[in-house]
Amino acid sequence: ETGVTQTPRHLVMGMTNKKSLKCEQHLGHNAMYWYKQSAKKPLELMFVYNFKEQTENNSVPSRFSPECPNSSHLFLHLHTLQPEDSALYLCASSQDRTVYGYTFGSGTRLTVV
Amino acid sequence: AQKVTQAQTEISVVEKEDVTLDCVYETRDTTYYLFWYKQPPSGELVFLIRRNSFDEQNEISGRYSWNFQKSTSSFNFTITASQVVDSAVYFCALSEVNYGGATNKLIFGTGTLLAVQP
């Protein structure tokens, strides 16, 4: 248990489905992040939230829709995904100053069929 | 611009060998932080170490040691007497600190896959 919990651990979805990934932390951190990790590629930062406000969107397609209702919870809503969206989606949290680094969740392994 | 380079994509060693993972970074800032994370097959990235740019003292933690050299912009990671449980992907990361507050993200390298054979 890392302090950041992601559910589900594995998800298989069709291209027409709608699903959501959930991330939860009770570390008292102010910032939360979504990363995408594809095979043979570097970690790609998708979204950053600081005190519930989105501070960064790295040109992510609109079929990915983040939601941060409070500093402890972060969602990633998925709809009409493509097979190339299959990846490990990692959530992380940090104090609002990244001098302390991130605490990561275990990730959701997403497969789009 | 910030950048982290891990030139070694994959390394394979036999148990008990020493292995060094290289990390080279680029930044214009004088104040920054460097990190190493380990990603075992289970997926989560586990924090290993943080080093600030003003502290070039090398650090040792058990079988792990880190060599920070600002002159070459490198922050290398050595595992002594490697074990099968060390098999994982290792990421080096950089965070800049801007005056008036830190930036809100880490820049990661592409990772090095370490395979330790029994």
Image (spheres, coloured by chain):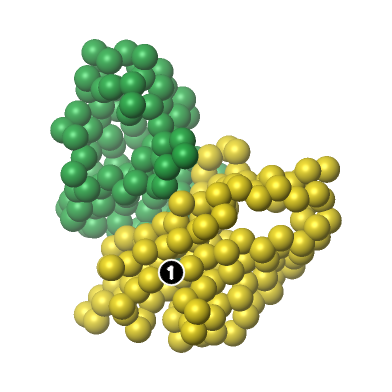
* Residue B89 in the image, given as x and y percentages of width and height: 57, 48
Quarter of the figure with the C terminus of chain B: top right
Chain depicted in yellow: B
**Which shade is chain A?**
green
- Residue located beneath label 1 in the image: B25
* Residue lying farthest to the front in this orientation: B7
Q: Is mark 1 on a helix, strand or loop?
A: strand
Q: Residue at x 47, y 76 (%)?
A: B73
Image mark 1: chain: B
Count of picture labels: 1
Q: Residue at x 32, y 13 (%)?
A: A14
Q: Is residue A69 in view from this perspective?
A: no
* Residue A12 in the image, given as x and y percentages of width and height: 40, 18
Q: Which residue is drawn at 38% across and 27% down?
A: A86
* Amino acid of disc 1: Tyr
Residue A53 versus residue A112: which sits nearer the camera?
Answer: A112
Quarter of the figure with the N terminus of chain B: bottom left
Residue B63 versus residue A92: which sits nearer the camera?
Answer: B63
Above or below: residue A86 compared with residue B50: above
